[in-house]
Amino acid sequence: MKQNKGQSTNLIPMISITVLFFMWGFITSLNDILIPYFKGVYNLSHFQANIVQFAFFIAYFVGALAFFLLAKKGKDPIHKFGYKTTLEIGLYIAGTACMLFTITATLNLGFGIFLLALFMLGIGLTFLQVAANPFVAMLGKPDTASSRLNLSQAFNSLGTTLGPALGGYFIFKIFLENSVGADAVKYPYLFLGLLLGLLALFIHNTKIKEPQTEKSDTNKNESIFKKTYVWLGALGIFFYVGAEVSIGSNMVAYLTSVSGGKIAESLAASYLSYYWGGAMIGRFLGAVSLSKIKTKLKVLYMGILAVVSFCLIYTINFYLHSLNIENVWYFLIFMLLNFLCFYLGKGKPARLLAIFAMVNSVLILIGMNILGFAGLWWVWALLAIGLFNSIMWSNVFTLAIDKLGDRTSEASSILIMMILGGAILPPLQGLIADLSNSMTISFIVPLISYIYLIFYGLKGYSINKK
């Protein structure tokens, strides 16, 4: 990959893409609010409610598969129109899908049309994912690609942090009290649709220089699946997204059921913001840890970012949901553990991935109460998984597209296709919860996912990589 001349030429594109990451993080995390909301409105089972995630994430598979097939012939939108136009197309599709939400709620068209709108929203975000992730990776030196992608992902997590807190507040506390049926989602998605349209216009009028790629040393006619680390990385994306979404999707139901109703849905939604907020904190720290900043300054910057990020999450939840420090001090302990694991990772993406996956496996065992921790440790162990999910997407993604040159968009399509995990694993977890009549047992699904990610971080990333 060739680096564009001058770091200043990368600044505006980086800011533009970072705003995109924030927006689709906010929208994606609202699904976790829609699941318990639709479950109540339409009297759905755990499995049926998780179809929300299936409709949304199956769109990534369908859209990315189309990208992949077109990319093999050089006819995908990125090759034909460039990264900028591909991003604009994605924003307009996503904005239209949000408007369909508003129409469906206004006319009371039913749960099925909401699922169609979610599928359309997922198609729009597929365009953004396929274009934005490699775009960020190529805006600079290859050895700092994980750092840049972690920074953008951190703002994605800022969106997923604000989504449950603000979405839970407005949908459950404001609009639901003055609405009938599914009408409470009308105005939030109308606002999001308009915002996405404005963002598309902003991108259109922003000067963005297309990144250049070197020619691949791989024969175009040779299947990219012969590069083992690529398809193993695709499986890594499948399990990572599936685990992250499964936990987020079922967290509200888990907290309300295991607490015996002591934790209301609106309060559980605020707890959920710490799960997504942990990913934001971890990604900010990852952006610094994986950068070329001097070690002493890294510690300082990481400390400042951790404190500022926690204060943001705490302030939002304190004023909206009255969660004070007595309720959330557990989270600070896990933040210190996260900081320690970054130190042990030594700025190496694969090593860091393996360590974080190991920690998450232990946290799930605590959350399932298998290790016998008393008090609220089981709650905060599950919420703290977000801290260690943080760098997984960016690290798996950059490890899997390493050294691919002009075949990067082809591999990117495969990786985005495997967001399919978000469509498959949440309903699977919901089905296990229904059959076993236990939300606790259902967390075996993300546990298996993290065990695979341990393998990819230790060995899978390097298999058949020249």
Image (cartoon, grey):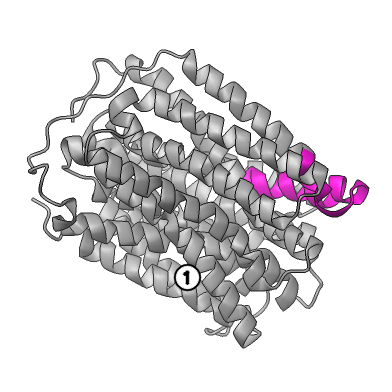
Q: Quadrant of residue 143?
A: top left
Q: Is residue 293 above or below residue 413?
A: above
**Residue to which mark 1 is pinned:** 446
Q: Is residue 40 above or below residue 293?
A: below
Left/right placement of residue 35 relative to residue 363 reads right
Left/right placement of residue 294 relative to residue 425 reads left
Percent coordinates x, y for residue 405 in the rendering: 17, 36
Q: Quadrant of residue 324?
A: bottom right
> Which of the two residues, 106 or 141, is positioned nearer the viewer here?
106
Left/right placement of residue 418 relative to residue 279 reads left
What residue is shown at x 33% (from left), y 60% (from top)? 236
What residue is shown at x 70% (from left), y 73% (from top)? 45
Can you see residue 130? yes
> Which of the two residues, 394 or 182, is positioned nearer the viewer here?
182
- The residues colored magenta run 160-186
Secondary structure of the residue carrying numbered label 1: helix
